[in-house]
Image (cartoon, grey):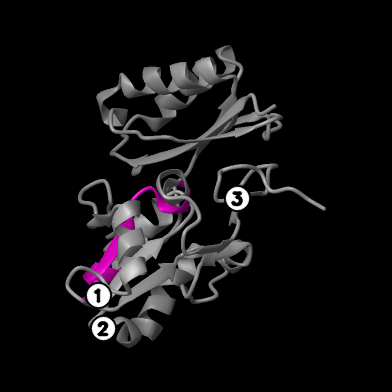
Amino acid sequence: MASVLNISAYLFTRLSDREALRPVLRARAEALGLKGTIILAEEGINLFLAGVAEPVRTFVDELRADVRFAALTPKESWSAEQPFGRLLVKLKREIIRMDHPTIRPEAERAPAVEPATLQRWLDQGHDDSGREIVLLDTRNTFEVDYGTFTGAVDWRIERFTQFPDAAATHRDDLAGKTVVSFCTGGIRCEKAAIYLRDAGVDALQLEGGILGYFEKVGGDHWSGECFVFDEREALTPTLEPRTFA
């Protein structure tokens, strides 16, 4: 029986006190018996946590009490066992490294498309303006190989810091099209969409990422599974851990 609640969440929000915040969040999570990883950077927070449902949700409620985290929206899934071996709270320069300090999602987001809208666009073969849709997978190659949207563009990058160079190489291929960038939970595709828009590409981000799409829509137009960074390895479109023969 799946009794362990797993959450993933991120939020771009300016944190000037991350050093002081680190021991506070660690103490809260430890007291609630949670395991996983919390990443704090000046640009925001990224977390993957698991535990008994009520303590996990209590942690989120306490986090949201801080106005800077009020908009945090975790994505939930379940597992039979704890997928993390320990609790880590890390300080990093970026919550997802891109090495482009001018890209600041905490200041202004790129426009987003909701999962149900994307599903409708894919069903009809174009967006509401009749333009061709390009689904751009912003994840690393090994993640893409677990599964992706049917027909998605994959630039075979090995790490996200390679995305800007790949975007410059392929920019002309995206001209005149509606580009929807996507990733596991939304964090990489949010930065990617901002970068592309700054380069003159009409780019949107998929709200909630792949896991948000699975939650709201399911596996329509998806092929395979979605890699996740814990011991479950990958999730199916029903948000269940992959099974092995």
| Front one among 18 and 137 | 137
Question: How far, Cα to Cα, is label 1 from label 2?
Answer: 6 Å
Q: Is residue 203 located in the magenta-colored stretch of the structure?
A: yes
Label 1 or label 2, whichever comes before in sequence order: 2
Mark 3 Cα-neighbour bin, 10 Å: few <14, some 14–19, many ≥20 = some
Q: Is residue 106 located in the magenta-colored stretch of the structure?
A: no
Q: Which residues are magenta?
A: 196-211
Residue at point 56% right, 43% down? 239
Label 1 or label 3, whichever comes before in sequence order: 1
- Residue farthest toward the left in the current orientation of the protein: 129
Q: Is residue 26 above or below residue 235?
A: above
* Image quadrant in which the N terminus is located: top right
Residue under numbered circle 2:
175
- Residue farthest toward the top in the current orientation of the protein: 31
The image quarter in which residue 124 lies: bottom left
Q: Which mark is residue 236?
A: 3
Q: Position of residue 157 (x, y in %)?
A: 53, 72
| Front one among 186 and 238 | 238
Q: Is residue 90 above or below residue 223?
A: above
Badge 3 marks a residue whose secondary structure is loop
Q: Which mark is residue 201?
A: 1
